[in-house]
Every structure is written in C-alpha cells, then in structure tokens.
Amino acid sequence: MKRVQRKNMSIWLWLLVLIMALIIGYFLGKGYRITAPTKNSSKIKTPELILTSKAIDIIKELNCVCGSCTEKLMNCTCKIYRGADEMKQFIQLRVNEGLSKSQILEKIVEKYGKGALIK
C-alpha cells in the first residue's frame, strides 16, 4: 500500500514540475523577465503621442524651451526635461481638457515662460 502511495505522490510531483516548466516557458516565450530588474529598467517606454489638428496649430506657434536646442517646437524631437515631447504632451492634454487656444497659450507661458512663444 505504501508503495502505491509513494508512486502516486511521485507522479503528482512530476506533474507539478511539468506544469511549472510549461508556465515558465510560456512567459519566457512572451518576452517577460523572470530575473531581477537591472539599473536601466527605470526608463519607461511611453507610447507615441498622437496630436490632434488643434494641438498642431498651437505647436506651430511655439519654440522648444529645453535650453539645449533652438528649434521650433513643431520640428523638435528632444526628449529631455522640459523638451519637445513634454511640451507637446502638455499641449495635447490641455486640448483634450477642452481649453481654447488662448487659454492653452496662457498656460504655456505660465509653465514655460514667454520664450516659448514665436514672436
């Protein structure tokens, strides 16, 4: 009787190991990381920003104010703090909130200064 119980337990143990291997294989196949995160994993990949025509009209009237470039905001792609990506996202969010063009431009000047406006 003990021999039969031991054999059943052994089968269940192997079945459990097989299931765990399948689960781990599934997640590795999907590209999930099972190891500890690295130092560089703090970088968050953001989805591409989709701008509406209203946001683009506003962006055409602005400069990038990151401090390291002298580009017009429409042409700039800098991803640094207070750079083009941040400004474009800020503008699109204000458009999504339903603010008018003049209200958005006021908020831009409040946040980024008058240097953001193309004269």
Image (tube, helix red, strand yellow):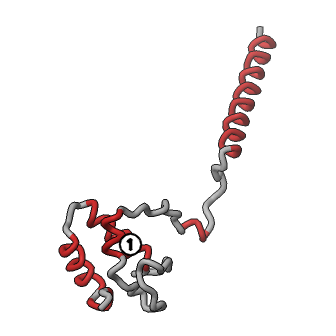
Relative to 69, say whether 53 is above or below.
above
**From this viewpoint, which residue is outermost toward the top?**
1
Q: Is residue 59 left or right of residue 10?
A: left
Work out whether residue 20 or residue 8 is closer to the camera in this orientation and state it: 20
The image quadrant of residue 110 is: bottom left
Mark 1 surroundings within 10 Å by alpha-carbon count, few (fewer than 14), some (14 through 19), many (20 or more): many
What residue do we see at 42% from left, 86% from top? 66
Q: Amino acid at mark 1?
A: Lys
Q: Is residue 108 left or right of residue 87?
A: left
Relative to 117, say whether 9 is above or below.
above
Q: Is residue 117 left or right of residue 12?
A: left
Q: Determine the secondary structure under disc 1.
A: helix
The image quadrant of residue 8 is: top right
Work out whether residue 40 or residue 8 is closer to the camera in this orientation and state it: 40
What residue do we see at 65% from left, 51% from top? 34
Q: Position of residue 78 (x, y in %)?
A: 50, 80
Quadrant where the C terminus lies? bottom left
Work out whether residue 61 or residue 80 is closer to the camera in this orientation and state it: 61
Question: How many numbered discs sit on the rendered protein?
Answer: 1
Q: Position of residue 13 (x, y in %)?
A: 73, 26
Q: Position of residue 83 (x, y in %)?
A: 43, 80
Quadrant where the N terminus lies? top right
Residue position for label 1 = 88
Relative to 23, say whether 64 is above or below.
below
What residue do we see at 40% from left, 74% from top? 86
What residue do we see at 49% from left, 60% from top? 47
Q: Position of residue 9 (x, y in %)?
A: 73, 20
